[in-house]
Amino acid sequence: MALHNIPLTSENLRGSFSREYSPAVTISSGDTLCLTTPDIEWGYSTDKDTPRKIFHPAEEESSPKHPVIGPVHIEGAAQGMTVEIHIEKLVPGWYGRNWGGGGTSWQNEAMQINVAEKKQLDWILDSSTGEATTVIAGKNFTVPMNPFLGLIGLQPRGRGVHPTSPPYYTGGNIDCKELTAGSRLFLPVEVLEAGLYVGDGHAAQGDGEVSGTAIECPMDEVVLTIHLHKEQTITQPYALTPAGLISFGFDTDLNIAAANALRDIIRRTAETYKISREEAAALASAVVDLRITQVVNGVKGVHAVLPLHKIKQQ
């Protein structure tokens, strides 16, 4: 088991996914990654007195999106296996930004906001208090922070270049606020050596990510331990988090995304408690939350939360 420190350099950044990219690092199962991620605009500043440094993809890309560290190759990984990412530590940077309005999207039209005018909020992040503060119309607004990485994913199946924006069934831009420190995310492997990408730091986000952005921030420190489960085969992501067991569903149709998440959480509930699926459905109706993860990435996300800590058995 080794510790790999991945420096924040352009050489280690990508703005898309491809099987042709050279690895930022190759690791073994059980190894730990320690890294720093840039903000959503490819910049990073260590403190208020240091100007932001702007980074670029490691090689020319036609339309880079989210800046992500990777790919990280995992020795021995092959299709049909499962990668577990243990999120051990997340320390956001000192600043964050998000936006409302601007551009034509169904949610902007639904919210009846000015699609021609884009408003930016600048946030000051205080990890000592766990709060983020911004100024709107001359007044201070403070919200609690809940740091997580919006994007953790393995290389999707298929050749060619894949955009980072939509979530895939190998993970990616899931944007689930429950994936905080202490969580374990399980992803299916579709290609040799898996190809892990991570980035898109968020200081806080509501379910849905309704404006299209969370409080987008750099992460000063991210610590992840990676395990390869060679005998475990899954077809979609799931996670064990402080909130409970989570199943994910993705689709352009929100109903189908919900059905995919629901089907998996019922199966996992039945397996966890050794009950029938019909009994699991009844139990889930009493305790499982079906939540909209995000609706802004083309492919929508739904996650189902089974709060294991709330269920008592005798």
Image: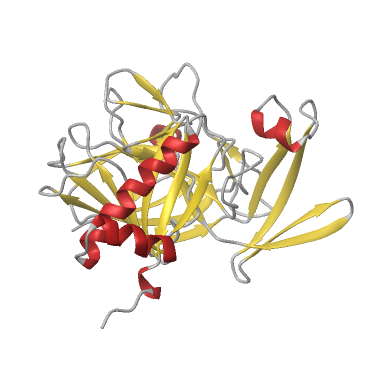
Determine whether, in the image, residue 49 is placed left or right of residue 112.
Answer: left
- Give the quadrant of residue 132: bottom right
- Give the quadrant of residue 139: bottom right
- Give the quadrant of residue 78: top left
Whether residue 97 is situated above or below residue 42 in the rendered picture: below
| Residue 296 place in picture, x, y as percent | 57, 35
Determine whether, in the image, residue 219 is placed left or right of residue 132.
Answer: left
The C terminus, quarter of image:
bottom left
Residue lying farthest to the right in this orientation: 138
| Residue 163 place in picture, x, y as percent | 43, 25
Question: At 36% from the left edge and 20% from the top edge, which residue is drawn?
Answer: 161
Question: At 70% from the left edge and 40% from the top edge, which residue is drawn?
Answer: 99
The N terminus, quarter of image:
bottom left
The foreground one among 116 and 120 is 116
The foreground one among 137 and 62 is 137
| Residue 302 place in picture, x, y as percent | 46, 45
Question: At 66% from the left edge and 27% from the top edge, which residue is drawn?
Answer: 105
Whether residue 125 is situated above or below residue 55 in the rendered picture: below
| Residue 125 place in picture, x, y as percent | 65, 59
Residue lying farthest to the bottom in this orientation: 314
Determine whether, in the image, residue 15 is placed left or right of residue 235.
Answer: right
Can you see residue 119?
yes
Whether residue 218 is situated above or below residue 104 in the rendered picture: below
Can you see residue 183?
no
Count of numbered marks = 0
